[in-house]
Amino acid sequence: MTRLVLPIAVLALGGFWPVLAGEAERVPAQLAVTAVRGVPDLERLMLEREILRRFEARNCGLRLPRPEEAPVWRIEVALLFWRESEGPGGVPVFDPRSGTYLPGRRRDIETVYSLRVYRSEAAPPPDVPAKQHTLRVHAETKPNASYEPREHASRMLREQLAEEVRSAVCRTVRD
């Protein structure tokens, strides 16, 4: 039994070393997601979480700084505008309580954001405005009664925005 445990432990440690080596090669970066008045705070927090998840999933050579460690890169995402609207659209949805079909709904979400990526030692001049980007998504009701267009549109917007930020940051860090 002892002979079997030792090779398994050695194999397990062998798979762990590349993870440690990859972590050492990654550079610390600090992410700040801010929002103007009118942007839901929950959306801002969920967007920050999605951006961090994207950086962990796809390696850009960045990681969060450890305590008492100065970041090499700073990433600033500012949500400047947020508008949600609902209107008719999609397929009618059956309501089991009333036994009738309710009209379909469409949820539109639009946001404007800016992104700055810079090295910590060379902060951009504060008088130079960051380039603004606009993102629009929509979702409509489907035959599934549990499908909520507002939740789906919000998730789609977060995913698209996080992917755009990740892509732009990776390009900047590589250059």
Image: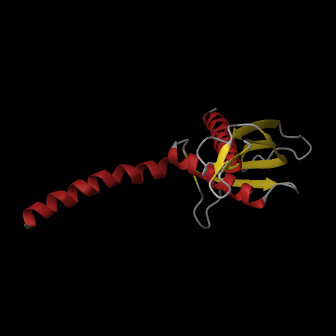
Specify the color scheme: secondary structure
Residue 91, image x, y percentages:
67, 37
Left or right, residue 129 beside residue 68: right
User: In the picture provided, is 114 more to the left or to the right than 63?
Assistant: right
Q: Looking at the image, which residue is at 61% across and 37% down?
A: 170
Residue 60 picture quarter: top right
Q: Is residue 146 above or below residue 161?
A: below
Which residue does the image show at 63% across and 43% down from the upper left?
159
| Quadrant in the rendering for residue 124 | top right
Towards the viewer: 8 or 110: 110
User: Is 34 situated above or below 139?
Assistant: below
Left-right relation of 98 to 64: right
Looking at the picture, tell me which residue is in the foreground, 4 or 48: 48
Residue 166 coordinates in the image, percent (x, y): 63, 41
Q: Specify the quadrant that holds the C terminus.
A: top right
For the image shown, how many numbered marks are present on the structure? Answer: 0
Picture quarter with the N terminus: bottom left
* Residue 67 screen position, x and y as percent: 60, 67
In this view, the residue farthest toward the right is 127
Residue at the image position 62 percent from the left and 48 percent from the top: 147
Q: Residue furthest front?
A: 99
